[in-house]
Image (cartoon, rainbow, N blue to C red):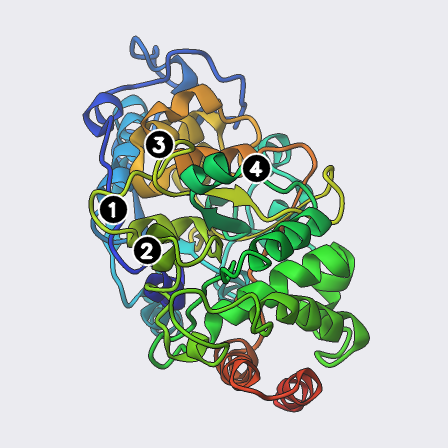
Amino acid sequence: MTARNHRRRGLSLAGMAALALFASACGGSSADNDTAGGDPSKAPVAGCEEYTQYGDLSGKTVTVYTGIVTPEDAQLKATWAPFEKCTGATIKGEFDKTFEAQILVRAKAGNLPDIAIVPQPGLLQTLVKTGKAVAADQATTDMVDKNFSASWKGYGSVDGKFYAPPQNASMKSLVWYSPKEFTEKGYKVPTTLDELMTLTETIAKTGKKPWCAGIASGEATGWPVTDWMEDFMLRTAGPEAYDKWVNHEIPFNGPESTAALEEAGKYLKNSKFVNGGYGDVKSIASTTFQDGGLPILKGNCSFHRQASFYAANWPKGTTVAPDGDIFAFYLPGKAATDKPVLGGGEFMLGFRDAPEVHAFQAYVASATWANLAEQGGGGRCATPNKNADPAKAAGCSDIDKLAISVLQDPNAVFRFDGSDAMPSAVGANSFWKQATNWITGQSTKDTVDKIEASWPK
């Protein structure tokens, strides 16, 4: 998770359910047929059958460095405990909120962990290009091929070589709303973009501003607009064009991306549609992203497009559930069968070529690990592992369960947050700034032209 994503999360995620349950466990309640190689040199401990594939790692230590901090670090460590108990290995975690800056410093100094949990493809590529990362072994590769889509494997690869298996995921393609309002007004959750626009227009005709939004975030002001544009780029131009846009194989001011920003503008820059509860279109720029969706609770707007982590920003006492005060629906595609998904994720990048390091990477790529993460609830629930058992997610929030169902949908086409993968001069600078200028009145053409001009030569 990037530092920028830490800013996006707002309040800390709650929920530590089931930690004690699986912290002391050696295995799940049902067998996992994943195979990661390795011949155990001793008889398996009762309940550890799923872990024999990783071998006897007694006396071995694997160091893991990550930016995941309290309270999620406890949930993460709990998923390591069965591996430690059943293989004899020790997993030594280092949890540092300055991870993203320090991992590059440590790479330069040659002071690297065995594994780094990397929160974005761009940083992963930078670390691999230091020449100090170790490619995944065949067993880990096979595990990822079995449990993840090709797009997820691709994000853990550099120049055609696979390095880092995925871990968790976050989902951004969500629209928050009031289930009570939908019930009272007879509204139905839209399943296509046309239905979303029709419902927006229907609400606007009642005199109510359907949408509310906020993009203020200190030095990162403007980042929520990047997510809007990326979601519409995926939906209007498709995943192949999206990839080319992120990699600058097509220009930022090309027809595809220009059209995507215009589509976002049909909502964000329409004075009849925004900014419910706050003011006119320009008020979006001065409203913090944490406060952006709160007018829904007062009936001042109906929709707020924001990621799953926004669940932490609702006031204490708010019931977030399909029949609660607040819930969310998937931001639909052009057709009901289309499932483009924008999000983020984490990758286990290794720096030491050793059996215990490879074994631990394979374990985290297994359905066994994903099921334990789901059981933990809180912030470690959502997984793109297609073989994770949704029934294990009883301790997860309803929003996490929704995210899991979308991520595991056979039709889901996942793409990583584009601005996180762009050069920092663009993704964490001009894109934010010009998106803010766009909200306050700058034309779409001037906006995309200025961002294109900022791209490093």
**First-in-chain label (4 vs 2):** 2
Query: Secondary structure under badge 3?
Result: loop
Looking at the image, the residue that sits furthest to the right is: 255
Tag 1 residue: 73
Q: Is residue 62 above or below residue 99?
A: above
Q: Amino acid at mark 2?
A: Thr
> Dot 3, how many residues are within 10 Å of its Cα: few (below 14), some (14-19), or many (20+)?
many
Tag 2 residue: 66
Image coords of residue 275 (percent x, y): 46, 69
**First-in-chain label (3 vs 4):** 3
Image mark for residue 396: 3
For the residues labelled 2 and 1, the Cα–Cα distance comes to: 9 Å
Instruction: Tell me the residue at 39%/26% (across/down).
Output: 393
Query: Secondary structure under badge 1?
Result: helix
Q: Amino acid at mark 4?
A: Val
Front disc: 2 or 3: 3
* Nearest to the observer: residue 337 or residue 359: 337
* Nearest to the observer: residue 262 or residue 120: 262
For the residues labelled 2 and 3, the Cα–Cα distance comes to: 22 Å
Mark 3–mark 1 CB contact (< 8 Å): no
